[in-house]
């Protein structure tokens, strides 16, 4: 697990030896079959982690088995060319926007880059949203999927308007496909007969081929993701109690 921010500086919540050790303990427990919620509580309580630090571990630390399984599902971004692609709209856009806005990100054990802001349910269009959308569309223009389907969570305020905007910009840029606001995007994303772009673990675990579209954009834009205090945590047994 590595953690960083869009500006390549370190967030204050990450500067903690306790966080590094908690990551080791959390992963150790997961590798031995402990329930995720209980394992996080044990590690978090032991090292007196804050809510934000616990959320970072939740987003970034996984068992060796889960990480290997997800890594096998990741395909190179360029393989979307001439293939059908479904995009988990808020998941991808919020992650790219987090990088542009210098919010903390985590490079997780399973290879995906995730934001730790927890904004998905309360998303509001911000100054960087337009730029984030354009960066996504630029990738689609470059690699040209045969059809691209953006899916947004309809229960989130103004999702229909956002889907309409993305659809309009797709047409302007000559990108074939659609953008929709639907009640439960997961019902379409899981089992989609093509490639899925998301970092949502529940969707990844039930998909055959996945691209970390947001992660690709972030790596391209910020080529030198600086190592944080949480990087390089080896898979070693936790300290004895």
Image (spheres, helix red, strand yellow):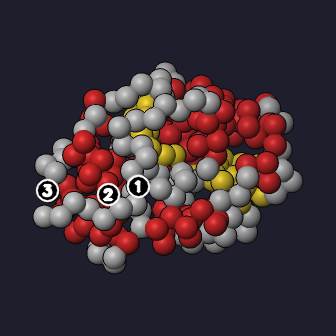
Who's the residue at 80% across and 54% down the image?
A: 79
Query: 13 or 178, which is in the foreground?
Result: 13
Mark closer to the observer (3, 1): 1
At mark 1, the secondary structure is loop
Residue 193 position, x and y percent, is 73, 69
Q: CA distance from mark 1 to mark 2?
A: 7 Å
Who's the residue at 81% across and 37% down the image?
A: 142
Q: Is residue 45 visible?
A: yes
Compared across the picture, whether 114 is left or right of 240 comes to right
Number of callouts: 3
Q: Earlier in the sequence, mark 3 or mark 1?
A: 3
Compared across the picture, whether 94 is left or right of 49 comes to right
Residue 201 position, x and y percent, is 48, 62
Q: Assess disc 2: are there few (<14), some (14-19) or many (≥20) residues with their C-alpha within 10 Å of its C-alpha.
A: many
Compared across the picture, whether 74 is left or right of 89 comes to right
Q: Could you tell me which quadrant the C terminus lies in? A: bottom left
Q: Based on the displayed image, in which of its 4 quarters is residue 14 positioned?
A: top left
Label 1 sits on residue? 234
Label 3 sits on residue? 45
Dot 1 and dot 2 residues touching (CB under 8 Å): yes
Q: Earlier in the sequence, mark 1 or mark 2?
A: 2
Q: Assess disc 1: are there few (<14), some (14-19) or many (≥20) residues with their C-alpha within 10 Å of its C-alpha.
A: few
Residue 66 position, x and y percent, is 48, 69
Q: Is residue 119 above or below residue 109?
A: above
Q: Assess disc 3: are there few (<14), some (14-19) or many (≥20) residues with their C-alpha within 10 Å of its C-alpha.
A: few
Mark closer to the observer (1, 2): 1
Label 2 sits on residue? 24
Who's the residue at 45% across and 35% down the image?
A: 227
At mark 2, the secondary structure is helix
Q: Earlier in the sequence, mark 3 or mark 2?
A: 2
């Amino acid at each position: 697990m590595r953690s960083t921010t869009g500006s390549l500086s370190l967030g204050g919540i990450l500067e903690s030896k306790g966080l590094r050790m908690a990551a080791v303990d959390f992963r150790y427990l997961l590798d031995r079959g402990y329930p995720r919620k209980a394992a996080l509580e044990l590690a978090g309580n032991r090292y007196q982690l804050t809510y934000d630090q616990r959320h970072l571990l939740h987003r970034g630390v996984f068992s060796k088995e889960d990480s290997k399984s997800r890594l096998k599902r990741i395909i190179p971004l360029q393989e979307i060319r001439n293939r059908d692609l479904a995009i988990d709209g808020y998941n991808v856009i919020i992650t790219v926007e987090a990088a542009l806005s210098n919010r903390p990100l985590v490079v997780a054990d399973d290879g995906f880059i995730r934001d730790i802001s927890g904004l998905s349910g309360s998303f509001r269009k911000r100054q960087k949203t337009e730029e984030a959308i354009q960066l996504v569309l630029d990738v689609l223009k470059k690699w040209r999927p045969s059809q691209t389907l953006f899916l947004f969570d309809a229960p989130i305020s103004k999702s229909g308007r956002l889907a309409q905007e993305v659809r309009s910009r797709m047409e302007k840029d000559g990108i074939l496909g659609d953008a929709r606001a639907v009640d439960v995007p997961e019902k379409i994303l899981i089992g989609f007969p093509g490639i899925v772009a998301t970092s949502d673990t529940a969707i990844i675990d039930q998909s055959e081929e996945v691209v970390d579209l947001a992660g690709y954009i972030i790596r391209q834009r910020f080529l030198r993701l600086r190592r944080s205090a949480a990087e390089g945590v080896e898979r070693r047994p936790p300290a004895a109690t």
